[in-house]
Image (tube, coloured by chain):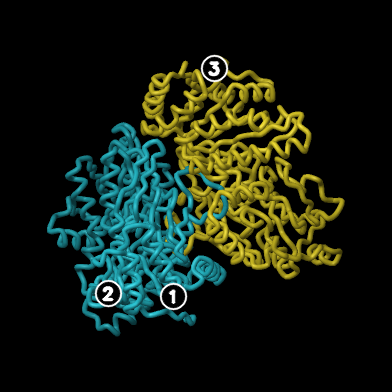
Chain colours: A cyan, B yellow
Amino acid sequence: MPNWTYHTIDENDVLNLRALIGEEQRMLWKEQISEDYSHDELGGTSSWPELVIKPVSANEVSAVMKYAYEHSIPVTARGSGTGLVGSCVPMEHGIILDLSLMNNILELDEENLTLTVEPGVLLMDLTAFVEDHDLFYPPDPGEKSATIGGNISTNAGGMRAVKYGVTRDFVRGLEVVLPNGDIVEFGGKVVKNSSGYDLKDLIIGSEGTLGIVTKAILKLLPLPKKTISLLIPFPSLEKAIQTVPKIIKSKAIPTAIEFMQKEVIEDAEEYLGKAFPDHQSEAYLLLKFDGNSQDEIERAYAKVADLCLEEGALDVLISDTAERDESIWKARGAFLEAIKGSTTYMDEVDMVVPRSYVNDMVEYLHSIQREVGLRIKSFGHAGDGNLHAYMLKDNLSDEEWEKRLNKAMDLIYAKARELNGQVSGEHGIGYAKKMYLKESLAKDNIDLMNGIKQVFDAKNILNPHKIAQL
Amino acid sequence: MPNWTYHTIDENDVLNLRALIGEEQRMLWKEQISEDYSHDELGGTSSWPELVIKPVSANEVSAVMKYAYEHSIPVTARGSGTGLVGSCVPMEHGIILDLSLMNNILELDEENLTLTVEPGVLLMDLTAFVEDHDLFYPPDPGEKSATIGGNISTNAGGMRAVKYGVTRDFVRGLEVVLPNGDIVEFGGKVVKNSSGYDLKDLIIGSEGTLGIVTKAILKLLPLPKKTISLLIPFPSLEKAIQTVPKIIKSKAIPTAIEFMQKEVIEDAEEYLGKAFPDHQSEAYLLLKFDGNSQDEIERAYAKVADLCLEEGALDVLISDTAERDESIWKARGAFLEAIKGSTTYMDEVDMVVPRSYVNDMVEYLHSIQREVGLRIKSFGHAGDGNLHAYMLKDNLSDEEWEKRLNKAMDLIYAKARELNGQVSGEHGIGYAKKMYLKESLAKDNIDLMNGIKQVFDAKNILNPHKIAQL
């Protein structure tokens, strides 16, 4: 580990920072700090901040950063804390900037189809707001209580990536506070931009290690007038997943293609206390189509439905009412929580492979369960190659769990590399996955990342020990 | 200017490099080098290479880079040389790597909808190839004889950005030779990726200053089955352009929205020796719609046609045959060459503004012609805010031209900044626009760009003096 030294926050710092912030209740120190601030959703990475500050403006973020920069105090940004890899956990303690109060929707510009927001706006509030205006923000990660700032920091993906892409594809411009406290803009409302290096996309997915996003200009689309879902039972998971590349090759463009297994659906039924609308099969594909007319969508899905039946699907259940749709997608949305509830503790892998290799990866996950001695459950985005695999601790001792988990992780990431995959499709690297990132990339890539980190943050005060930084 | 020193290529270097390349005819030295290699399409930036090498593989590029790195010889990559800002002009002489022989289409992967290509593939060959497979590569810059490598290096945009986005949006992965000669991969065939800093997007638009692209994995879409164009005459340019934000606000999604003025259309008629299909007006909007059925497209364009008529359009001419379409789009495609042919010399501005400000900018261009004493012609992508303005030298003396051109440039870029625009929408910064980039961005942004350049290229041998590097 490099030899960084940081200043420990003392009473004098607290007084100075309070003068910058003004309102006392927006600073938490010592026993005022709740345990939540020491971890994220998954909880595998833990470290306490010395001080929590809840800024309400870019100017406050800037003032705190300038102070931290001058005094070598580490700073870690945090949104809703719904991450899974420890990105928002302050490994060197110092200050947590809790951005949840910066939750204003600043401007809807219908002539440019952009929405300008502060980073603390929750994804569910953002999508509700734009849908009220008959507009559409397509990125659709499962966790709707995440903040848009958090989504930008991990380049969150979600279900609709098959057709629409990921968070990166919907960020036109960012206001960012640099580690030295300067407030800068990358990109803007413009649709095209070839004006120098793409600093905006460098910030997206950088997990708060290069700068703190204080404003984002998002691209919107018109809201599709109609959506339809297809729930398609297959005789086996293999049959289901092997159909996906054929759907892509058929030139249909579904909005989403998910795969689901009976065992995970049952977890969701138990977690939600609600029956899933179908029980005939071990494995399902769940597809969504959207468009502006019934005709258009029907043409698209009829072709896919026929193709699935040709490939051995047992049935094609069409869901075109909001109620039915909800019962299916709610189950899908509850998978993470449901699996979490089915065991004592778990860890996850969020690898992405070329979508033609999804079946190879899922089969591999099944095959190693006995070898490593762990239950592994998986679900995911069959249409974009992004798989979520969950290793379950169950009744294992801590020691045995660590041993088996590490073995499973090593095997899975090695397999992902073999299939030309990447360590993370949408959850990021944070603290928990950085050893695997290092193994999966060439030394040049890691060196370039750390070089860029150094350019942005020479004093290494912004969220240290994350991504490529060992 | 920083104090970089480079080694001048001597006979010994030529012998050593020849040993790396093998075939003599793929190296040009001294009088073998044609004048073309000293400039790009626009010709405003001029500097000769000492040696031209035409590699046929990433390994050859790597071998040359390793040699150049060791001996501090500057290297500049070149595709078709169709750029407009001097990006491929070797300001410090040294080696030009002419990548035009690396023009193989390597793989069409229909299960992942990707196309893997070498950088020297021409855009027109690429689009023809994928369309033969009923697939679609949407980026559509006017210059079809550009290479895909050149398109990636400037993040080229084109007409279809309104609906589909730009080159960046269709690059999934890159193989890149770094200045030290190492061959690395950024991204891949994967649809999602949150695995560390986004090095792929840093390379895209970096104009050959950070690495040399030797392979690209492109994202494809199914080819829309039907396209229709609307040519819409308006009583004035102002009326035409002011209708564009209303089209966007109406939630229609045209593939392209271009504006055209009579004077530029006349240049194109003369240049092509072919009449434009309509002459009733001073100003036109040209729209394209695509989709998979006549119905779907008709629904979309009928709404827009009505809206244009409400806004004062004189007529709506529907072009749904290939012949008619060609006569319109060929004129549009010839604008740059036609304007060039109408004067002795010209220079250009490729600014991009939020699309609601296009009219302000076009009016401003008209208004300053008298003030600066120059004819200024413009056309461009009304739907995405990217305007091309051409300052014409006509019969001015060199001295007077320089003076008036600089004044016009200063005024136009100042106006673009005032409208929250950027210096370049799609042509890049290169050598010609770097002073304007510096003026348009904060010092932090420029410093970050130069810091990143230093991380990739500590010896500054790759295409020096470009983008942010004064």
Label 1: element kind:
loop
Q: Residues within 10 Å of mark 3 (few under 14, many from 20)?
A: some
Residue at the spot of label 1: A72
Residue at the spot of label 3: B281
Callout 1, which amino acid?
Ser
Q: Residue at x 64, y 50 (%)?
A: B435
Residues beneath discs 3 and 2 located on the same chain: no
Callout 2, which amino acid?
Trp
User: Does any portion of residue B348 appear in the rendered image?
Assistant: yes
Q: Going by the picture, which residue comes out furthest to the top?
A: B280
x and y percentages locating residue A196 in the rendered image: 57, 52
Q: Which is more toward the observer, B149 or A302?
A: B149
Q: Residue at x 49, y 45 (%)?
A: B220
Q: Which is more toward the observer, A154 or A32?
A: A32
Spatial separation of the CA atoms under disc 3 and disc 1: 65 Å
Q: Residues within 10 Å of mark 2 (few under 14, many from 20)?
A: some
Q: Earlier in the sequence, mark 2 or mark 1?
A: 2
Callout 3, which amino acid?
Ser
Name the side, left or right, on which B344 lies relative to B455. Answer: right
x and y percentages locating residue B333 in the rendered image: 61, 31
Name the side, left or right, on which A313 lies relative to A112. Answer: left
Name the side, left or right, on which A313 lies relative to B66. Answer: left
Residue at the spot of label 2: A29
Label pair 2/1, CB-CB below 8 angstroms: no
Q: Chain of mark 1?
A: A
Q: Chain of mark 2?
A: A
Label 2: element kind:
strand
Compared to residue B266, the image places residue B101 above or below, namely below
Q: Nearer the viewer, mark 3 or mark 2?
A: 2
Label 3: element kind:
loop
